[in-house]
Image: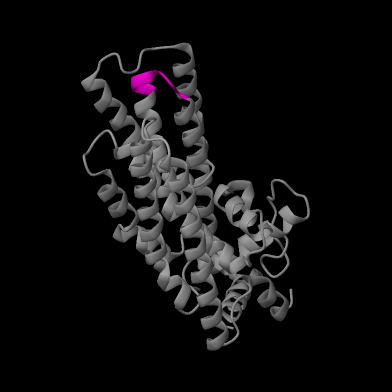
Amino acid sequence: MDISHRQTKLGTPKSWWDRRARVSANINQAYTLFLLISDVYFRLTAGHPDKGGKQFRAGARDIALIISATLILMIPAWIASPLVRDSFWIDFVWADQFSTQLRDGTLYPRWLPESHNGLGAPVFYFYPPLAFYLAGTLSLLGLSTYWSVIATFGIAMAGSGIAMLYWLKDWTRRPLVGALLYIAAPYHMVDFYSRGALAEYCAYAILPLVALGIRRAAGRRQFEMLAISYAALIMTHLPAALLTTLFFIIPYCLFLTSRNRDAFLPSASWWSVWYRARFDILAADDCVAAPCRARNHGDATRSSGIELEFAHAVTLASG
């Protein structure tokens, strides 16, 4: 595809003044959206002090603070030069083709025809697509490919804080502090600004929901949230799902069982879920190992046009 055409699609700024104008417009839009959300929350809770209005307002205030912290942490992405390093350029190339196929009516894009200098790539035959569905939806709503990816990082950041807030509510007196520390964790910032690991970053927004689902399953015998959040984790990032299963879900279940031996009563539905999950974990391991084995063919991959795509992405983002 022509470089100028891709530059138009990515929507990257062509000059410092253009970038400055777009940054100002984005900040104004984000601030307006924040004021609108805050106004809706406080209007809904203003007239109901006898129906949990105080608790609802407190929750709305915490969510508003998390969104504000997210906007502050996202400022470097708005005012700095376009982020094209490590995995960012892969995010842009994949999100561009993913959103194009969504726009053309393909509900589950698997083959990316423009990768490898037009030879194509079977990326989403093995790579979980959930994070790119979010980026593709934002692109369909009018954002350029570049800003849809950046906005996906922002939504995942705010979502991870809100999810952590609700998980910590019954564990600590200061759940907001834990949520803010979670979104500002150094590794999360490195994942965003240095690595551009879009799918892995989105997986961190789902981890607290998995933990909350486990606690609800143990206390209320409600497995819906656990099933949905665990499936979303698998559909977002397979290595994170594998590590979470082995080093968080199992130890956390054992911890809850040590506090209450009846936390997880045997049932047909429960054992069927974990029996099926065993095969999902094995399949996830195969899917994780396959791309790693494919890296041994680096010379053939580079000759197929990946270096050209990287050059395109650098040119597009630098304007």
Q: Which one is in front, 260 or 29?
A: 29
Give the x, y percent position of residue 214: 37, 29
Is residue 308 positioned above or below 193 on the image?
A: below
Colour style of the rendered protein structure: one colour
Number of numbered tags placed on the structure image: 0
Residue 274 lies within the magenta run: no
Where is residue 256, by image quadrant?
A: top left
Residue at 55%, 51% (x, y): give it: 131
Q: Which residue lies furthest to the right in this view?
A: 104
Q: Which one is in front, 143 or 231?
A: 143
Give the x, y percent position of residue 318: 55, 82
Give the x, y percent position of residue 313: 59, 75
Q: Which one is in front, 299 or 250?
A: 250
Side (left or right) of 164 relative to 96: left
Where is residue 146, by image quadrant?
A: bottom right
Residue at 62%, 77% (x, y): give it: 312
Residue at 52%, 57% (x, y): give it: 152
Give the x, y percent position of residue 245: 39, 35
Side (left or right) of 266 relative to 148: left
Does any portion of residue 199 appear in the rendered image? no
**Where are the magenta residues, as a range?**
217-223
Q: Which quarter shows the C terminus? A: bottom right
Is residue 224 positioned above or below 93 on the image?
A: above
Q: Which quarter shows the N terminus? A: bottom right
